[in-house]
Image: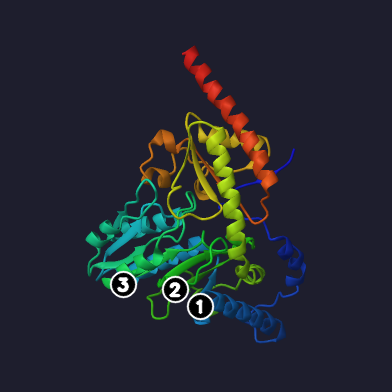
Amino acid sequence: MAKVYLDHNGTTPLDPELKLKIPDFLDLWGNPSSIHWAGRETKSRIQKIRHQIAESFGISPLEIIFNSGGSEGNNTVIKSVFQILGHERPHFLVSSVEHPSVMKSYEAIKALGAHVEKIPVSRSGQIDFEFIQSRLSEKTAMVSVMLANNETGSIYPIKALADLAHSKGALFHCDAVQGFGKIPFQLKDLGVDYATFSAHKFYALKGTGFLYVKKGSPYVNLVHGGGQERHRRGGTENILGILSLGFMAEKLSEVSLQFDRIEKLRNYFEARILSEIPDVVVNSAQGLRLPNTSSLILQDVDGETLLMSLDLKGFAVSTGAACSSGNPEPSPVLLALGLSREEAQSSLRVSLGWQTSQAEVDLFIETLKSVVIRLRSLKEDSKVIR
């Protein structure tokens, strides 16, 4: 049985070229905080990668903090801003479709006294600008809106949103995890104060990422320890992870080329699905989306049952965020879009990658068609029996 991976928003497989380089990276094992030759070698390499990433995003190397990934970065930013500004500016705005690491962080500071309001989104995934304008005040500390949604693929107008927040003196935080390696962008053009990134969403090793903190932005350590990352994040650096991140950062110039190819493949997939399977809706199809992401609602099909049926046939897909898998409740993101519980529980997320071929997509479409027909037939039979 062939195995086809179509869940690249959950995580990505290691880049084939990176996989070959891993043995060489293992030779760099010294502690970067040590002053002897073994430490100097690794410290020098990490600094080189820091400068490389900074140049790619048009920022200063001093504005980059290596960490364990997006969840740590989001927790750090939200809790830092609340700790420093929460007394004078206790109000926060967060989009209603954020990643769980953002939502849970806001729940944590809300329990400590923060006033947190969720920004509505439309059925097509558009952010409600008027709501933000009506709620922003001199009491607003920060606005949080992700660059791209992990479930629907919707891309948000971050520059305009950041400018709006700044007009009232509020900071702007952007979870950029899903945009990293999927769409070309520069942080200096987005105008954000904070942005978070995860290496494993861009074909590198898990457990590594980085946090962008614009010079002068409020910041408090989440992890205390040694003097690593200029005393901003304690703990010995994940050398192997950072080296893998640096390797993939060298491929950021390829993102634009991959964007066009993958978007054409995604559009081909959706066109066939809509023409060959009845009663299917593509979420947020009219708005700007990640090129690789397709969020589907398949009427009269239970998403979890569909996922398991496809898994048995060798296809790895998702019903939503990987961090929420196993939760019987429908996706909070889809509910925030205005979908009913029944619609949200009939969802399927397909996310393509750099190695995905049209042959794999064709095979998946044929399998999906047969599985949907079978599941709908079983549902009709159960209605007759009742």
Asked if the residue at tag 2 contacts the one at tag 1, i.e. Cβ–Cβ closer than 8 Å, the answer is: yes
Q: Residue at x 22, y 70 (%)?
A: 138
Label 1: how many residues lie within 10 Å, few (<14), some (14-19) or many (20+)?
Answer: some
113 to 279, vertically: above or below: below
Q: Which residue is mark 1?
A: 58
Structural crowding at the residue carrying mark 3, measured as other residues with C-alpha within 10 Å and reported as few (<14), some (14–19) or many (≥20): some
Earlier residue among tags 1 and 2: 1
Tell me if I can see residue 351 in this picture: no
Mark 2 surroundings: few (<14), some (14-19) or many (≥20) residues within 10 A: few
- Between residue 113 and residue 360, name the one nearer to us: 360
Q: Which residue is mark 3?
A: 166
Q: Amino acid at mark 1?
A: Gly
Mark 3 or 2: in front is: 2
What is the spatial separation of the Cα atoms under label 3 and label 2, in whole angstroms? 14 Å
Type of the residue with mark 2: Asp
Which numbered circle lies on residue 189? 2
Residue 375 image label:
none
**Alpha carbon of mark 1 to alpha carbon of mark 3: how far?**
20 Å
